[in-house]
Amino acid sequence: MDISFLYPLIETVAKVLFFTFGLVLPLVAYSTYAERKLSAIIQDRVGPNRVGIPLTLLGFKKDIPLFGLIQPIADGVKGLLKEDFTPTYVRKFFFWIAPALTAIPAFLTLAVIPFGSQITIPFIDYTVNLTIADLNVGPLFVFAIASLSVYGITFAGWASNNKYSFFGGVRSCAQMISYEIALGLSLIPVLMFFGELNLGSIVEQQAHGGWTLLPLWNESGFILSEAYWSHQDAFLNWFMLIPLGIAFIVFTVSIFAETNRMPFDLPECETELVGGYHTEYSSMKFALFFIGEYTAMIVGSAIIITLFLGGWSLGFGLDRLLLWDHELGAWKSYAGIVHLGCFMTKIVAFVLFFILIRWTVPRFRYDQLMRLGWVVFFELALINIFIAAIILMWNTDGFTTVPKIISIISLSVFSFLMIWLAKSINTKRGSHSMPQS
Amino acid sequence: MLSPIFYLFAAITLLGGIGVIAWKNPVSSALCMVASFVGIAGLFVGLNAYFVGVLQVLVYAGAIMVLFIFIIMLLDLKPSKYASFPPPTIAAAILIPLVIMFQLVVVISKTEAQPILINEASLKAAEKTELSLDPEAPNYIAKDSKIRKELSEGKLPDVHLIGNKLFTEFHFPLQVIGLLLLVATVGCIVLSRNTNSSQE
């Protein structure tokens, strides 16, 4: 019987199940372990080191500890078995729906992440693209769905019917809206550079033409060879490092703020708000907030890696070795597996970076957070778009000297006005010397 | 044939819309409105307008409704107390939807009901017939542009098409709208600043 018409359906289901339950959820579980272990190292403690294979349950004398690697499973079981306590004074419906509203958007955004290039399954000769949905609006889709996750935290704070939880919810609402602006604007230079909104094509361009932040090779060759500099975009890549580097910094910091991670975890700031929006939550509902936060963190790092650090590509011209006959787009059948491994390695590295930042940088004050978002990043991202546009304009034929000079003058006037404005806001705020929340 | 996905999202849109007016609690109403917006976004995606659908979620569900809910929560609005509405309200509530319905029926009856099929073949054909190589024509697209490349591969470059239209043919209205929004923003700041200074 010919079942080849079912392949696309099977492919989609398999990809959804594998990427969500096979890759991201275990990664979520083990990033909690990594977080506890790394924080222990930084604070000179031991960290979780006991939970292993529980042989004592079977009557043996000793457990096998395995450096506490089974800890996440024990945590999950604990979450499920603990009493799920709902206070009587909460708004029941919203109290129940809030944890789901945090976790679901985080998982939905996984749909457009390109986890790898392609795998060709032998015997049936069927090519699988390692992206669940190869949309033409990739980054916008991620922003759109991620912006829905603000409802979860806000509803959690409001439904708890508790002042401190409510403060946490309102804070997170204001914080996420503010940083979404910086997030969106900082991305524009990158999209201008690639002329593309499809994350898969963006990575493919980076695989052969050099990573966005590391243009050490291109289609013609490696940087030290003469062929590299004879390529038409060789100089453009290096000039674009200025706006793209700024975009990278603004984008990464905004991702920290969007995922409510330290140093921007004001919504759950223990010193001021008990536990913030999840004070009243217990057991699995509480765990869902954590799963949502860690998934958002993993998706955030995946987006940063995809846009700036080459996504799934091996880089340094090594991707060429995975092509049939050096023909672009014709990947070998196992190329996807190599790329998937590369992508996961990069994600793990970035998650460790997230964790390292959390345990080294102290928390911001709320007014500092808002000022950073609205006064520094907003202006910086706007100026950055101008810089990128001018560099791209110099690279495009068909512009005479007059518009080029006018654009540079307008850039300097615009930047001067922006910086002057930002400074005046800062000094005005400073004269009050009262933290606003 | 309409796909089952269409019915799913249409149901979400309609149920969300009903929920907005059926619930007395303002936060519930706002949440229903979010559901309705997500449903509309799904309908746009079903029409191959991915960009518009995503913007619908990004702008309306993700930003504007968040601000609504923010304000509702901050003001701690109580569920509306109206047990029954005054007659003029009911009359307006019947009349305005009727006018809109009438308009909708007229528009639909006037348009030629030809389903537009979007598939690989039609997109490849559109690249040849719908676009012009004459720089003066309104549908001019340069020869080696991304739009032509994508269309000839049988893909719909909706973002590039919208961008091209907005920044060439409709560039002036776009700038005017931008200015309008700027005026509104400045007005907002001026109004809120004034109340602050009078209190001090």
Image (tube, rainbow, N blue to C red):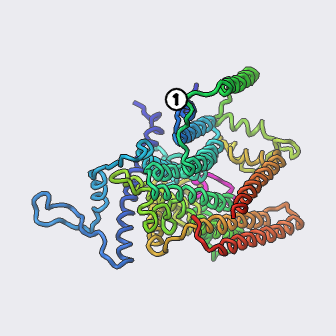
Q: Amino acid at mark 1?
A: Pro
Foreground residue, A137 or B147?
A: A137
Q: Is B94 colored magenta in this rendering?
A: no
Where does the magenta region start and end? Answer: A192-204
Residue at which label 1 appears: B4
Main SS class of the magenta portion in the image: helix
Residue at 37% of width from left, 50% of height from top? A285
Q: Position of residue B37 (x, y in %)?
A: 59, 39
Residue closest to the far bottom: A44
User: Quarter of the image holding residue A212?
Assistant: bottom right
Q: On the rendered structure, is B28 left or right of B170? A: left
Q: Position of residue A323 (x, y in %)?
A: 54, 58
Q: On the rendered structure, is A281 left or right of A431? A: left
Foreground residue, A96 or B57?
A: A96
Residue closest to the far top: B109
Q: Chain of mark 1?
A: B
Q: Using the rendered image of the protein, determine whether residue A322 is visible from the camera's viewpoint.
A: no
Exactly how many numbered labels are in the figure? 1
Q: Is A197 colored magenta in this rendering?
A: yes
Q: Quadrant of the N terminus of chain A?
A: top left
Residue at 54% of width from left, 49% of height from top? B73
Q: Using the rendered image of the protein, determine whether residue B91 is visible from the camera's viewpoint.
A: yes
